């Protein structure tokens, strides 16, 4: 992610959109977390397990 935030074209886009670097970093982090959660839910569902609700962590029963 740090490479994206250093990219001159990204910074130019952010200036044009009047968006701060911090706000863009937060947007990227939120999107990555949402994607991770969806991928984990998809993986668990394909294994016959229930997906993890947002805000909860997977806990092993072993």
Image (cartoon, rainbow, N blue to C red):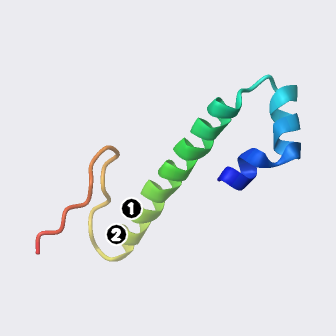
Pick the quarter of the image with the C terminus.
bottom left
Q: Is residue 30 above or below residue 17?
A: below
Residue 27 in the figure: left or right of residue 8: left
User: Residue 28 has which mark?
Assistant: none
Q: Nearer the viewer, residue 45 or 52?
A: 52
Q: Which mark is residue 44?
A: 2
Q: Find residue 9 and report its image quarter.
A: top right
Residue 59 at what x, y percent from top left?
19, 62
Task: Please say if the residues under marks 1 and 2 sit with CB atoms less than 8 Å apart.
Answer: yes
Residue at x 72% of width, y 45% of height: 5
Disc 2, SS: helix
Q: Which residue in the structure is indicated by mark 1?
A: 41
Q: Is residue 5 left or right of residue 49?
A: right
Res. 46 image quadrant: bottom left
Label 1 element class: helix
Residue 20, placed above or below residue 31:
above
Real-space Cα distance between discs 1 and 2?
5 Å
Residue that sits furthest to the left in the current view: 62
**46 relative to 32, above or below:** below
Relative depth, front residue between 58 and 9: 9
Q: Residue at x 27, y 48 (%)?
A: 56
Badge 1: few (under 14), some or many (20 or more) residues near its Cα, within 10 Å?
some
In x, y percent, where is residue 60? 17, 68
Dot 2: few (<14), some (14–19), or many (≥20) neighbours within 10 Å? some
Q: Position of residue 24 (x, y in %)?
A: 67, 36
Q: Residue at left 39%, top 61%? A: 41
Residue farthest to the top? 18
Where is residue 57 shown, x and y percent of the image? 27, 54
From this view, report whether residue 10 is shown above or below residue 37. Answer: above
Q: Residue at x 63, y 39 (%)?
A: 25
């Amino acid at each position: 992610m740090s490479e994206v935030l250093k990219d001159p074209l990204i910074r130019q886009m952010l200036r044009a959109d009047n968006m701060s670097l911090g706000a863009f970093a937060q947007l990227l982090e939120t999107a990555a977390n949402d994607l991770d959660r969806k991928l984990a839910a998809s993986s668990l569902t394909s294994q016959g397990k229930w997906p993890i609700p947002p805000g909860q962590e997977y806990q092993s029963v072993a």
